[in-house]
Image (spheres, grey):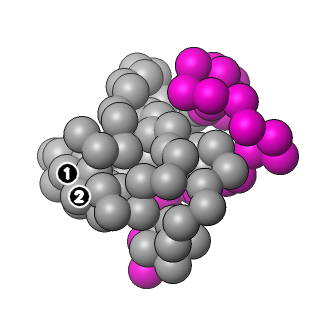
Amino acid sequence: MSKLQVSVIIPVHNGAEYIAKALDSALAQDVPLEILVIDDLSEDDLDTVMEPYLCDPRIRYMKNSSQLGVAQSRNKGVALVRGTYVEFLDADG
C-alpha cells in the first residue's frame, strides 16, 4: 500500500440520511486515504448506516462523549490523523 496521503475528517450530527453518500464520494478518490467520522452525539440511525463501512480499514468511526459541535469535532479529528494532508468533508456534502 502506498504511503497514506490524505486524511478526510467528517464530523456528523444526525446525518444518517447523508453519510453514505459522503463516504462513497471520499472512497471513490484515487489516493491513499483514511476517513475519520466523528459522531457528535447523533440521535438518528447513524450507527446502523455506518455498520457496513466499518469493515473497511480506511474508515475510523468515533463518538464524542459530549456534544462538541462541528468545529471542535473537526479539531478532534485533526489530532488523530495519520495522513500528510487533511481534508474536511461535511456529512451532507
Which label number is shown at residue 73? Answer: none
- Compared with 31, 22 (above or below) is below
Task: For the residues labelled 2 and 1, say whether their Cβ atoms are less than 8 Å apart.
Answer: yes
Residue 49 lies, in percent from the top left, at: 43, 74
**Residue stretch rendered in magenta on the structure:** 51-80
Residue at the right extreme of this rendering: 65
Q: In the orientation shown, which residue stands out farthest toward the front?
A: 43
On the image, the x and y values in percent for residue 2 come to 35, 45
Q: Residue at x 42, y 63 (%)?
A: 16
For the residues marked 2 and 1, what is the alpha-carbon distance in whole angstroms? 6 Å
What amino acid is at disc 1?
Answer: Ser
Relative height, residue 54 to residue 7 (above, below): below
User: Is residue 40 in the magenta section?
Assistant: no
Residue displayed at 19% across by 51% down: 25
Q: Amino acid at mark 2?
A: Lys
Q: Position of residue 7 (x, y in %)?
A: 44, 34
- What element does badge 1 sit on? helix
Q: Please provide percent x and percent y for residue 12.
A: 50, 44
Residue 25 - label: 1
Question: In this rendering, does residue 63 appear at all?
Answer: yes
Residue 57 part of the magenta-drawn span: yes
Q: Which residue is mark 2?
A: 21
In what element is the residue under mark 2?
Answer: helix
80 horizontally vs 32: left or right: right
